[in-house]
Image (cartoon, rainbow, N blue to C red):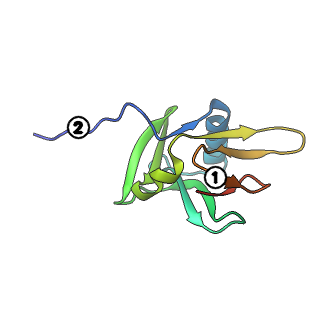
Amino acid sequence: MSELNETTTTPVTITQSAIKQLEVIRREQNIPEDQGLRIGVKGGGCSGFSYMIGFDHKQDSDQEFIINGMKVFMDKLHGIYLLGMEIDWDEGLNNRGFTFKNPNAKTTCGCGTSFSA
């Protein structure tokens, strides 16, 4: 008998406007449906860590979630930095792009894409 591991909560939130933009990117770049959205962090950036977002195949160390209908992969080790984060898409006059609202960030940089924890 196989065990079903179901999670009712997801570590991050992706707004509808961000999902819409990600679907546009997937379509325009012909990204296959078997790839999911990878969300993570890497060392670097002006505050210590930078956010990673892009389409990729699932890796052995990944957790998989369905967020607003999108398959999302996240390395288990990155969860501590991303728990509770919201990813949004901004179409403002001064800024256009993905924004990251992270409750775990102690400081952030002016560009909003790097943080320290």
Identify the residue at horizontal 72%, vertical 66% (top origin): 46
* Residue 35 in view: no
**Image position of 67 (left or right of 102):** left
Rendered-image quadrant of the N terminus? top left
Q: Amino acid at mark 1?
A: Lys
Residue that sits furthest to the bottom in the current view: 44
User: Height in image: 42 above or below 74?
Assistant: below
- Identified at 59% across, 54% down, the residue is 53
Q: Are marks 1 and 2 in contact (CB under 8 Å)?
A: no
Query: What amino acid is found at the position of numbered circle 2 in the picture?
Result: Leu
Residue 38 seen by the camera: yes
In the image, residue 7 lies at what x, y percent?
35, 35
How many marks overall? Answer: 2
Viewer-nearest of labels 1 and 2?
1
Q: What secondary structure is marked by label 2?
A: loop
Residue sitting at x 62%, y 51%: 105
Circle 1 crowding by C-alpha within 10 Å: few under 14, some 14–19, many from 20: few
* Quadrant placement of the C terminus: bottom right
Instruction: Answer above or below: position of 42 versus 65.
Output: below
Residue 37 lies, in percent from the top left, at 52, 49
Sequence order check: which comes first, mark 1 or mark 2? 2
Residue sticking out furthest to the right: 93
Camera-side residue of 4 and 100: 100
Is 57 left or right of 24, judged from the image as shown?
A: left
State the residue lying farthest toward the front.
106
The residue indicated by pointer 2 is 4
Q: Which mark is residue 33?
A: none
The residue labelled by disc 1 is 106
Please identify the quarter of the rendering in which residue 89 is found.
top right
Q: Relative to 96, is 3 on the left or the right? A: left
In the image, residue 28 above or below residue 90: below
Give the x, y percent position of residue 47.
Answer: 69, 63
